Amino acid sequence: MRYGLVLLLWFPLLLQAQVFDDFEDGDFSQNPQWTGTDTTFIVNENKQLQLNASTAGLSWLSTPNTLIGETEWRFFIKMSFSPSSNNNGRFYLVSDQQDVSQSVNGYFLQFGEAGSSDAIELFRQDGGSFVSVCRGTEGLIASSFAMGIKVVREETGDWHVFADPAGGENYVPQGEGFDNTYTSTAFIGVYAKYTVSNSTKFYFDNIYAGDIIVDNDPPVLLSVLAETDSTLILVFNEALEAESAGNTNNYTVDQGIENPVNAALDEGNPVQVVLHFSGKFENGQNYTISVSGVRDLAGNVMQPQQMDFSWLVASPSDVVINEIMADPSPQVGLPNYEYIELYNQTDVTVSMDNWVLTIGSGDKLFGHVSIAPNGYLIVAKEDAEQDLSAYGPFYGFSSFSLTNSGQILELRNDRGDLISAVTYSDNWYKDPDKEDGGWSLEQINPENICSGGDNWQAAEEPKGGTPGTQNSVYSDLILYPEVAHFELFANNIVHLYYNQAMNPESMAETTAYTVNKDIGNPSAVYTNTDQPDFAELYFTRAFQPGTVYEMMISSSVKNCRDMEMLHDTLIAFGLAETADTGDVVINELLFNPWTNGVDYVEIYNRSLKIIDLSVLQLGTVKYSPPNPPDTSFYPIIHQQTILVPGAYALLTSSPATVEKQYVTSDPNVFLKTDPFPAYNNDEGTAILSTYTGEILDLFT
């Protein structure tokens, strides 16, 4: 498998190299030619040399190499199991024979042993006997691993062994020793001993044996992350020398923070330095760190650098769940993987170390990852990284599954604070064709997170979604909180429904609600965390029949993001009475609307009664002689809606369409009646009646 950057760096040196094979040609029979038990090896689809035996055994391959003096060996090795005495591998650096499974004279690296302290170990082999030259970190390869390996031999016989546990080229010293017994060689080779269960689980790649590769490039600081209010993690482009990395004088932070009290190279990841400070970073404050004097393993000293960073304790909605691909099949244009997209709404980098993503009832813990200011993070199964990382920063979990029909998603920071929550549904697509798969759900405006499903819809992007970029349905329209529905539940209880999830403390403030005629404020307001748009108001005094009351709702009531309503809201209400003929009349009828328009009926309460429209119905009479007239009735509305004396209401299938086509001073009286009667464009009859069939008004 090719590592493009590595090959670019190595190209001037490969002309003199004895051996290099990245298996990009798809076989191991030429350039160079590997021989041995060749029927038990393949080059897989990832362009790696892979063991592919069908039974237990011992397999090997070798290729000629004569360099041993000032020489360097590099290779990638992966063993997808816990090594043991019966399942282990070797890489022969030096061998005097082609068949490295025999009693050769030379040197090899051993990967796997009995027990649980497996370490990388360099051995000298003298025919049938073995002598340890040096041994690496105990337990480093006790379980499944994928590592980059480097070995350097000096002309004097000094050996140096390095490894990158992440599989790359940020090598950590593993051991060094002296042995000058053998000063000539004929072959290098790979060796695998295995039981049948592991007969396909050895991998080798990017094998190099040749001149020592000289590193003349100084290290470069790539990123700075505030992990806590007194800890920084610095990431460099290559492995560092521990002494200079641990020198606190090499690091200075402005605004009075100064030098760290401790600096330490991360032994498990030698490109990282962890700094601890005595001073505290202020929440949301920007800082600059100056770094100099740090050396890489070759002794190259970095150029002085400065880099900005900030510390942020994430608050609710700083990071939001912004896009959900729950059903990627059938594919429209994106890779066939489920994913969610997170969006950082702040102007500072947010560290997500130890954050928790809850999918349904399962929790997933984030490791070391951050989201750039106003940036995105695609989260999916780790197998999706190769495909989805092409669209933006990616983080993968070993398992990741979303329910097509909907479920709860929660994101909590390392303190357990709820930062973002979405309970999505397949109703949110608002498009039955896209609901069947291949399209993501996109948030319309990340600022409107309190609006629930009203702030989501299916993606409009032709590929089916926009992971890692601004959503295709994005709008900067801000949806302010307002009262969506009022219901007089009992003679001293009012139910209020808002159009958004609200701040429960703000919604429960009794002084935010005032009723005239000596009723005053409610004695108590109850809210429910499972229904964040609902409040139940209890009053000490009962509401009296035949009396119209007015409730003033203060604009100080806030939504879940502490956004206040645009204005105070005045609602007229009272205990409903029975409507009789002529109490409520049809005042206006639009039966032949504009093109792309809709019909409407305006009704007027000309009585002194308080009428509940949920017990009324709207009808039409169709005449088709000689057949008898066909009368159809439709409920005006399904929830309690009070029409006080002298008030109007406009009934239509699409209030938004009527509001767009006609001038109105009060769109709040527009009610959606669904289904709505079909009135002929030339003539017909409209009927207003009670549920019991009493005709209140008829218009022909």
Image: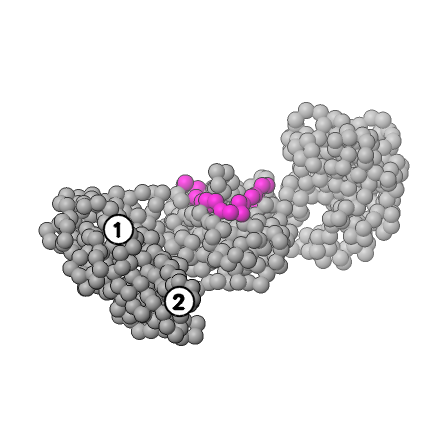
Q: Is residue 621 above or below residue 189?
A: below
Look at label 1 and name its amino acid. Answer: Glu
Report the Cα–Cα distance between label 2 and label 1.
Answer: 38 Å
- Classify mark 2: helix, strand or loop: loop
Residue 406 in magenta? yes
Residue 219: image tag = none
Q: Which residue is mark 2?
A: 623
Which quadrant: the C terminus?
Answer: bottom left
Q: Name the dominant secondary structure of the magenta segment.
A: loop
Q: Report if residue 163 lies within the magenta region.
A: no
State left or right for residue 320 relative to residue 551.
right
| Dot 1 crowding, Cα within 10 Å, few <14, some 14–19, many 20+ | some
Q: Say left or right for 224 vs 554.
A: right
- The disc placed on residue 487 is 1
Mark 2 or 1: the one toward you = 2
Question: Which span is picked out in magenta?
Answer: 396-416
Mark 2 Cα shell of 10 Å, populated few (<14), some (14-19), many (≥20)? some
Query: Is residue 548 visible in the rendered structure shown here?
Result: yes
In the displayed structure, 659 sits above or below 278; it is below
Q: Secondary structure at mark 1?
A: strand
The residue drawn where x is 34% and y is 56% is 635
| Residue 285 in the figure: left or right of residue 696 | right
